[in-house]
Amino acid sequence: MCGIVGYVGPRKVVPIIIEGLKRLEYRGYDSAGLVYLQDNKLRKHRCEGKLVNLEELMEEVDDGAGHIGLGHTRWATHGPPSEANAHPHSDCSGDLVVVHNGIIENFQTLRRELTARGHVFTSQTDTEVLAHLIEEHLDGDLAAAVRSAVREVDGSFALGVMWTGRPDMLVAARNQSPLVLGIQEGRGCFMASDIPALLPYTRNIIFLEDQEMAILKAGELQVMTLADGLPLEKEIQTIDWNASMAEKAGYRHFMLKEIYEQPLAVLNTFRGRLDPETGAINLPEIGLSRDKLRGLRRIFLLACGTSWHAALVAKYWLEKWVGIPVEVDIASEFRYRRLLLGPEVLVIPISQSGETADTLAGLRLAQKLGSRIISICNVVGSTITRESDGTIYTHAGPEIGVASTKAFTSQLTALFLLTLYLGQELETINQAKRIEFCRALVELPPIIEKELSRLQQDMDGLAEEFSRSRDFLYLGRGENFPIALEGALKLKEISYIHAEGYAAGELKHGPIALIDRDMPVLALVPRDGVYGKVISNVQEVKARHGRMILVGSEGDEALAEIADYAVYLPIIHEELNPILYVIPLQLLSYQIACLRGCDVDQPRNLAKSVTVE
Ligand code: AGP
């Protein structure tokens, strides 16, 4: 999605904008631009492609003492990537500019009406209507003009506005698209689409909420309601992510760094929420009394992509250990189905970013239908968390790589904790079993830590062998079926190799027709309750000259006899296998993508947070 950076203060603005936009590159974009005030004129520079093109452009420019400005990286939604469609966009006078993230759903109507009133458009974007609308309402008071203009707008926006008539201020406004504000005492005020852009300057952050706006000046920041301009007191949150957490810390890519951060991410997610001595689980975020929990008739999990795979694993856990029926839905399907929800259904949106449009829309629909919403999310203060009745945070830290890794294993950890908590409150898991599970969780991070380097070496070898494949099939059963889906998603989204995840038992119902020497098959075969069944499926592949990669339990000599390649993992508590078994699949995808020269952290066509439908 698009990235916004704005600054006003005593420092030179262009370097701040460029650096901030660089830290938002993970959001995915295809053009960039910036604007600053110099000699009371707006100096606008835009280009197609990556930020490096904008930096080269700026090398030719004396950006002078510009101290107030806005920058933007655009992920095209209306109109192709081009200089003309890049933000900032101007009004007719050229004295007012806007940068925007979101979608103006009624922009065609607005554009027609504005054109009929003499406005001249220079782009194909929805955003440009905002500049002309504000221009129409402008009567000396920029904030009031923004308020009036957005009343005519249907859709989502995070907005930055600048006008030569008020050279001392920026205006920010937000509706259904993320926008954070930063304050650096005596050194100015900032706006940005996400926290990493501000970390080099300040950790004092204010989260703008929907229907809120702000006026930023060098020495002060005022937040108010978007509807009426009424002042609002907002809490300043201190973000403990230091800049290095959002840096690569010496790894070649953010994705690899985040794969290696998984032991800590899993640990931080369960830390303080369980007692391995007593088996006590502590999740006050649920905020439901035992009576209310006893009244639950169903649990509904909704998510997209990798988060949906986490939900699929949780269904096995919750139904097995809590005994409440669980439905899982892809959020974009959930929101358009006839839903049978109500107070007796607990709805759990799962989202790393907390800004995914479909998941957020599903949350709002479930809330309207009377269900209680407990979200699982990785970003403090994100929209989904602020609209939930409670949130179980995954403490994975910032996940910059577009392909989700540590957030996924943290989501699984949080969902397993939720299973244990509900089992505790509904007395479906006795204390001895909870102690057993708590100990298994506590033992997991050091096991992952110990295996990562060895697994990466194992995967490097496999990647050499398979990086030129055109297709890949991933098989799993039970809780490992969603892990097969996740492995396939990882491979396709960063290496662009077509891959499918399948329930191993489904092989004979069609996919087996695909098997030949050119179709690598990876199967997850831990020594668990369905081991024998998966081995039978694997034999079917071998009989058709398929090339097999088996990921299974250390010490299982049979694997090497059957497979072309065997990858061994430590034997841990069977219930936690999904958290461990996804890791070699992440590393395999990463290594293959590197060998194929793909942009691992920002794969083509993808965005880290899909904030539009
Ligand atoms: C994960 O590797 C993908 N990039 C994508 O499927 C992602 O999981 C999905 O867009 C959901 O995002 P969220 O967890 O932030 O809601």
Image (cartoon, helix red, strand yellow):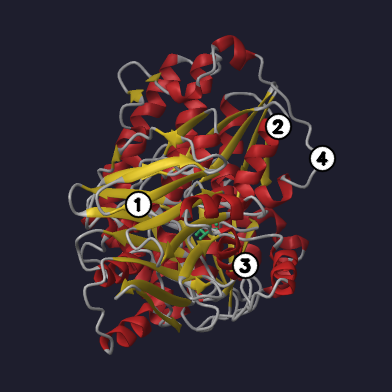
Return the residue at label 4. Answer: 338
Is 388 or 566 nearer to us in this picture?
Answer: 388
Q: Where residue 333 sits in the image (x, y, percent)?
A: 73, 50
Instruction: Find out whether the residues at labels 1 and 4 contact each other: C-beta distance under 8 Å.
Output: no
Circle 1 — which element? strand
* Depicted 469 relative to depicted 159: above or below: below
Nearer the observer: mark 2 or 3; the answer is 3
Q: Residue 216's mark?
A: 1
Q: Which part of the image, by quadrant, shows the C terminus?
A: bottom right
Residue under pointer 3: 129
Dot 1 or dot 2, earlier in sequence: 1
Q: Is residue 372 visible?
A: yes
Q: CA distance from mark 1 to mark 2?
A: 35 Å
Mark 1 → mark 4, Cα distance in angstroms? 44 Å
Question: Which of labels 2 and 4 is toward the front?
Answer: 2
State the residue at coordinates (56%, 61%): 134
Looking at the rendering, which quadrant does residue 17 occupy? bottom left
Question: Label 3 neighbourhood size at 10 Å, few (<14), some (14-19), many (20+)?
Answer: many
